[in-house]
Amino acid sequence: MAYDAVHGQVVLFGGLSSTFELLNDTLVWDGTNWSQDSPQSSPAPRSKLAMAYDSAASQVLLSGGQGATVLGDT
């Protein structure tokens, strides 16, 4: 999860479902409501990832996590 300062929202990606299925959902929180987002590109499903906001590029970055294997992508 990371705060996107340009859009004024928190971005949440991935995780596990209640049946421990890996997710590749992207959700955004605008301060009042969560909503499903559909980005043009999306990483593979994963949990245990890291996210941060890159102010120089004005974008949220995601790195690594646990999918079918340990992931080292950004």
Image (tube, rainbow, N blue to C red):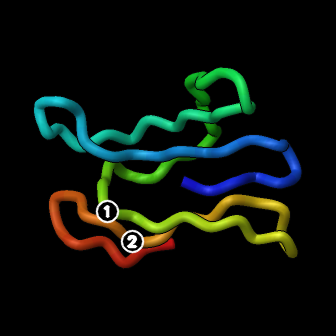
Q: Position of residue 46 (x, y in %)?
A: 31, 53
What element does badge 1 sit on? loop
Q: Badge 2, how many Cα within 10 Å: few under 14, some, many 20+?
A: some
Q: Position of residue 15 (x, y in %)?
A: 32, 46
Q: Position of residue 55 (x, y in %)?
A: 84, 70
Q: Position of residue 5 (x, y in %)?
A: 83, 54
Amino acid marked by disc 2: Gly
The residue identified by callout 2 is 64
Q: Are marks 1 and 2 in contact (CB under 8 Å)?
A: yes
Q: Between marks 1 and 2, how big is the CA–CA gap?
A: 8 Å
- For image coordinates 70% across by 54% down, the residue present is 3
Amino acid marked by disc 1: Lys
User: Of discs 1 and 2, which sits in the foreground?
Assistant: 1
Apparent side of residue 69 relative to residue 35 in the rendered image (left or right): left
Apparent side of residue 21 relative to residue 15 in the rendered image (left or right): left
- For image coordinates 37% across by 51% down, the residue present is 44
The residue identified by callout 1 is 48
Apparent side of residue 38 relative to residue 15 in the rendered image (left or right): right
Q: Which image quadrant is residue 27 in?
A: top right
Q: Residue furthest left?
A: 19
User: Which badge, 1 or 2, comes first in the chain's sequence?
Assistant: 1
- For image coordinates 25% across by 64% down, the residue present is 66
From this view, report whether residue 17 is shown above or below residue 64.
Answer: above
Q: Badge 1, how many Cα within 10 Å: few under 14, some, many 20+?
A: some
Q: Which mark is residue 30?
A: none
